[in-house]
Image: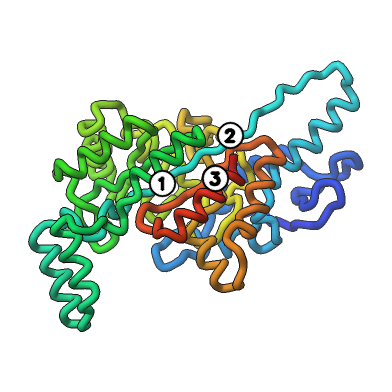
Amino acid sequence: MKDYSIEITNNAQYFKIFFKTDNTEIPFDIFGASFWLLSRYEEYLPHKTDQFNRFHYKSSVAYQYDFLQVPLVNLWQNELKKILQFKFPDLICRDRKYNFVSTIDIDNVFKYKFKGFVRSMAGYIYDLMHRNMEGIRKRTSIVLNRSKDPFDCYEFLIQKHVELEIKTIYFFLLGDYGINDKNHSANDLRFQSLIKHLSDYSAVGIHPSFGSNNNVQQLKVEVSRLANITHRQIGKSRQHFSMLKFPGTYQSLLQVGINEDYSMGYTNINGFRASWCYPYKWYSLDDEHETNLVIHPFCLTENTLTVEAEKHRANFLDLAAPLINEVKKYNGELISIFHNDTFDEKMKKIYCLFLQKAI
């Protein structure tokens, strides 16, 4: 893989450009630069990683040159379209329709319910050691079915999504228990019942576990678990912890029959990782061919918005609005990520307002 020298400059018409040429109308290699961003070429090269060995957003040229919040390739595409329509007035370009998909990651289906004897006792011991009597009372009330589990937001989500006709995908973590994979057992019939219930209203996908990274056999097991529960072929995925590594992650997904992935984004900053807000097929640089795996980029997560809102004392929805508007500007596909374990009463109200903005 050749490490190209990337020199990015500002441009009044194209905002940011690189791979400059002598062409006065389009002063850069628009196709080469677009391919470089969409293929995630920079992620194949040596780069800085975070604590989970993921590509660090600070290593990206989009962050370094301040266009992470702009789907730059979409902007370039629009400018190219204007030039072509001016030169060829009879040219008809097909217009896209804006699309919103709300995706919900279920990393931990319940906080206290159905944890099993060992995990429940471990929770009681932890609370006792920290003298958390309120936690003990709350856990006991929920285990005895006297109170609702704080992570149980599923009927609320179903009702809102049906009411507003929101397209939704639930991603279920079905890996083996580990330090970074702490969901209920996939063998728990009550968990299986919930998965079937949600799949009656929305699409479902696999949330490949942290433990399945670099382990195709484990990934295959997890996909099979979800397929056996839903009695449907599983074609959608999003990596737990967004553990997206090139090209291994996508190669593994293709091996187990996944044809749509929703991992293209960052978990610790909002924006456009591939500088693009449409679905597109993954191009394998190693094999130099377009694959059948469709990438659906996401640009915002509620966890990152919450952290930013607290850090800057800003409004959650005000921070989300610019990204929503960028996707709408290009009639793109807006994909948001929320987690079931964040839906307290405050977040439920925020989510309802967010849905109104997003649709």
- Residue 357 left/right relative to 162: right
| Label 3 environment density (alpha carbons within 10 Å; few <14, some 14–19, many ≥20) | some
Dot label at residue 355: 3
| Label 2 environment density (alpha carbons within 10 Å; few <14, some 14–19, many ≥20) | some
Q: Nearer the viewer, residue 39 or 294?
A: 294
Residue found at the very far front of the displayed protein: 146
Residue at (90%, 27%) from the top-left corner? 86
Quadrant in which the C terminus appears? top right
Residue at (63%, 43%) from the top-left corner? 276
Dot label at residue 104: 1
Give the residue type that dot 2 points to. Answer: Asn
- Residue 144 left/right relative to 78: left
- Counting residues from the start of the chain, the first of labels 1 and 3 encountered is 1
Q: Nearer the viewer, mark 1 or mark 3?
A: 3
- Counting residues from the start of the chain, the first of labels 3 and 2 encountered is 2
Give the residue type that dot 3 points to. Answer: Leu
Which quadrant would residue 51 be assigned to in this image? bottom left
Task: Report the colour scheme.
Answer: rainbow
Q: Secondary structure at mark 3?
A: helix
- Residue 350 left/right relative to 18: left
